[in-house]
Amino acid sequence: MKKILPILLLGASCTFSVSAAPTSVDTLVNQVESDVIKWRRHFHQHPELSNREFETAKTIANYMRSLGLQVQTGVAKTGVVAVLDSGKPGPVVALRADIDALPVIERVKLPFASKVTSTYNGQKVGVMHACGHDTHIAMLMGAATVLTKMKDKLRGKVKFIFQPAEEGAPAGEQGGADLMVKEGVLKNPDVDVIFGLHISAKRDVGTVAYREGGIMAAVDPFKIVVKGKQSHGAYPWNSVDPIVTSAQIIMGLQTIVSREVKLIDSAAVVTVGMIHGGNRSNIIPEQVELVGTIRTLNPDTRKKIHQSMANKVDFIAKSMGATAELTLPLDYSYPITYNPPKLMRKMLPTLTRTAGEKNVLITDAVTGAEDFSFFQEKVPGLYLFVGGKARDIPLSQAPDHHTPEFKIDESGMKLGVKLLTNLTLDYSQKH
């Protein structure tokens, strides 16, 4: 990797000279596109897991320094923050890209496919950029290059945030956007607005999808420990059966969404994903553990589900003669990824001008989660989806994110660079 880095920086610096006269966004994005593709392939071939993005961060920091930007490293362990100062009064616009990969073995036949292995939760795993964070890094580096060239068009400052551990910090560690916020990434200079993009393998290249309000769900993992009385399986009347009690609790939890949440207003999910209890067919155990997740798209629904879950777990357990302890949230919790309607409407003309009206699409909210929401809790921010699916590939054949087959069309990154650039310029000039 250390041998590749100078080549990457040399290629980029040959293409661009920071002192050259500024020109149009389209022209500069066209010029930087080949570098964006090279950067993406480099990061794809050398992925690193959450809080372990050491070489990734080093490569980013070296390049941002080559642009003459103020660079800070080691933010939230491995994050990189760079600041472009226009020298003129104005707002501070932040742009964010996540940089971590996933414990997935790549099965896509690419010349730059990942062969990296690492250790995750004590197991040897493959490592792959199976959610497109490699493209996010490359697009933000491209936008930084263009905005540096167009410094005279800017007002205020631009803060480029390369965030580690979006996929979640390793067990026992802190990380991600939450830790970045706690360490003051939105301060000094104080950020006025933040923009983020996510590549989508399910959306056509050249399109951008947006939504006012909740666009991605809050996520709240939970654990329920049900305690009863152990007995021989042949004599269940001597027991307080935590397995049957757990089954009743699981079915009760399903009625929260189906009977208590006004689904025409917003979707919600309550899922039990793990059950642990017992070790023999003829023993009723003393304890069962349930682990699951809650997904919600507005704060009122989130609060209602939390309250209802606590009630149901307690009352159902008592009705069976058992006890149950609910831990909610379990270990981490992400807020709703929420696009403020007023800000979304203000910036919509920028999306239309950049992508073309027919390519700007309203999207349904998704029950996946994003820790970009921690930034949005503190400052207004917009999160958008950029198409990464080749138009000649049917949607049914497009691979899912977080799978070994995940693949994107690199031509989609060009629009991402333009969006980040134009959102920054337009906000800077109008505020």
Image (tube, grey):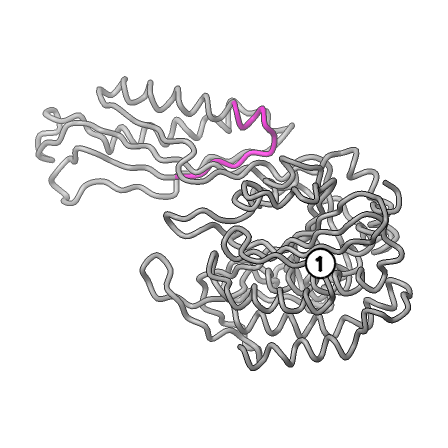
Question: Would residue 369 be seen by someone viewing this image from the given angle?
Answer: no
Judge left or right: residue 204 versus residue 125.
right
Whether residue 298 is in magenta: the answer is: yes
Judge left or right: residue 82 versus residue 344.
left
When asked about the image quadrant of residue 308, the answer is top left
Judge left or right: residue 319 versus residue 179.
left
When asked about the image quadrant of residue 343, the answer is top right
State which region is magenta. Answer: 292-303
Question: Which residue is at 75% across, 47% downward?
Answer: 93
Question: Which residue is at 84% across, 44% downward?
Answer: 89
Image quadrant holding the C terminus, namely: top right
Residue 216 percent across, percent down from the top left = 61, 41
Whether residue 94 is in magenta: the answer is: no
Question: Which residue is at 51% across, 53% downward?
Answer: 165
Q: Amino acid at mark 1?
A: Gly
In terms of depth relative to the viewer, which is nearer, 231 or 142?
A: 142
Establish if 174 lies above or below 225: below
Helix, strand or loop at label 1? It is: strand
Residue 95 percent across, percent down from the top left = 70, 51
Question: Would residue 135 be seen by someone viewing this image from the given angle?
Answer: yes
Residue 342 percent across, percent down from the top left = 79, 33
Q: Label 1 belongs to which residue?
A: 387
Establish if 76 lies above or below 338: below
Residue 12 percent across, percent down from the top left = 73, 75
Question: Which residue is at 56% across, 56% downward?
Answer: 79
| Badge count | 1
